[in-house]
Structures are given as C-alpha cells and as structure tokens.
Image (cartoon, rainbow, N blue to C red):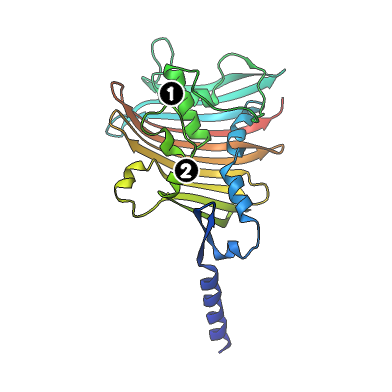
Amino acid sequence: MKYCLFFIYIIGFIAAHGQDTTIIIDNKKWTLPEVVVRNNFDYKKVLQQIKDDTSFYKAFKNLRTLNYSSFNDIKMLDKKGGIQATLYSKTQQVRANGCRTMNVLQEQVTGDMYTDSHDYNYLTAKLYASLFFTKGKICGETNIIAGTNISAEDKTGIDKHKEQLKTLFFNPGKKIPGIPFVGNKLDLYDDRAHKLYDYRLDIQDYHGTTCYVFSITPKETLGPKVDDIVVDNMVTWFDQRTLEVLARNYSLSYKAGVYDFDVSMEVEMTHFNGLLVPRVLRYKGNWGVIFKKRERGLFTATLFDFGKE
C-alpha cells in the first residue's frame, strides 16, 4: 500500500510540474514550465536579458586578445555530397605587445580549395578565415563590445557578404540590413515575429551547470505565413548564474528566387581566466546565388590551449 501511495504521489508531482504556463509580456506570449513559474524569480528580467544578450558576440571578441591553438577542418561538397575540396590544419594564434599573429603548424589541402594566387576559392572558406585565421600582424584590438556594431553599410562586394554572414553567426535573431527579401524577417523579437514563432524558457542541466534553456521554433499552423519563416530552430543554453551563453544550436533556411540558403550551426563555449570563449564550432551550409556557383560546405573549429600574452 505504501508503495502504491508513493507511486501515485510521484505521478501527481510529475504531472503538476510538467504543465506549461503562458505568460504575456508587452502583449507578447512566452511559454514557461510550471516549475519555472513557481520559482518566484523575475522571469521578465531574465527574458529581457536573454533578448539583449551580448555574451555570445563577446566570446568571439575575446579570441582577439588571447593566445590559442585551433584544429581547422573545412570540407566543400559537390551536388552529390562527394568531397570537392578540403583543408585541414592546426594553427596557433600568438598575442604579443598588443598585436596578434598566426602560425600554421600543419596544413593538408585537397581539390580546388585555393586559387592559383593562393586565395580561397570559396566564400565559405573565406568566411572561416575571417573568423579564425590571422593574416599578417593585427594590432590595437580589444574585447570591448560597448559601442561596437557589426555592420556592412560601408562595405561592398565580398566584404559586405562576409559582414552579413558574421551577423548571422554572432547575432542570430537580429535583422540584417542589406539582404534583399529576408533582412527584416530575421528579427525574432518584433511584433511580426511573435505571430510566427513560439518562445519557451526552461531549466536544464548542461554539462554540470544549471542553465536556462531558451528555444524559438515556428508555430505549427502558419498556412501561407510559412514563407516568412527564416529561423527553423534556435536553442540557447544560458548559465543560470551569469546568463552567459554556454551553447547555441540554430538552423536557418530561405528561398528567394535569386538566392537560397540552408545553414545550421552548433557552438559550444568554455572559460579561460574568467573569459567566455568558443570551444567548438560546427557549421553545415548549402547556399546559392544567381550567376554564382552553389556552395555546400562543412566546417569544424576546435579551439584549445588558451593563454594570455
């Protein structure tokens, strides 16, 4: 009898704590599990801080101020999924006297990864290089993000495209001016977006750290509005104590006639000397622009051996 009562109690406890609650903040709906609501914390403040997060971008800025090593694995695929070109290398960034340089310790290349002039033959590889490779000596950089903004307004051609793609990396969910048909559709927090997406805040353990897990997914019944969806899924793990991003997975896709893309990213963070830094970044992308060759690429960056100058 005791065991039956205990079993009934457990089932009742799970049921009571497994229910979701919809809250309204500024006329926008957010879904929280009952256990989060009952914790009596200021979830309005937490949701606002999540929306205004800068820790993800700052983690990449921190790389500019540190020594670190990296395994770099880039693969370009043909339309059948076969290997078209590859680059595998081990690099070491060295920071000294306020400047950073990079040593290539190992490099193996296949296919047409490089042009005859040793430039990258793919925009995917150029983007990777702009994120993780240092060309020559670069000085005067800091990890300060206050007052900084990723913008493509003063750039043209390939440089403009790289800045737009960086915005997709560092600020997913923010509008990107200059991308035809899709720029405003990337904003996940305006009134339009709340008619398209569901927002959920939960609590989970992530590698031993208690985290708020914030997920954004398209509503199940959109009808014709499904054409307005760009972000197919985004899940972010925030440290419950500091609200720093510990990991983020997201996927985006869109077809606009003159171009299309289908991109997914996974980013895992770690800490060095109190600084949040990327530990692993995985990318899978398939995109095409009219009059340019389609690119199907995979890359993985694994960062380690962080150090101060």
Q: Is residue 285 left or right of residue 205?
A: left
Mark toward the viewer: 1 or 2? 2
Quarter of the rendering occupied by the C terminus: top right
Count residues near mark 2 (Cα–Cα under 10 Å), then give few for <14, some for 14-19, many for 20+: many
Q: Secondary structure at mark 1?
A: helix
Q: Is residue 269 left or right of residue 108?
A: right
Disc 2 residue type (three-letter) = Leu
Count residues near mark 1 (Cα–Cα under 10 Å), then give few for <14, some for 14-19, many for 20+: some
Residue 247 in the image, given as x and y percentages of width and height: 55, 44
**Residue 115 visible within the image:** yes
Specify the label residue 61 is tagged with: none
Q: Is residue 108 left or right of residue 82?
A: right
Residue 252 in the image, given as x and y percentages of width and height: 40, 39
**Residue 300 visible within the image:** no
Sequence-wise, the earlier of marks 1 and 2 is 1
Residue pointed to by mark 1: 161
Contact between marks 1 and 2 (CB within 8 A): the answer is: no
Q: In this picture, is 131 found above or below 45? A: above
Place residue 182 in its image quadrant. Answer: top left
Residue pointed to by mark 2: 188
Q: Secondary structure at mark 2?
A: loop
From the viewer's side, name the closer residue of 270 and 31: 31
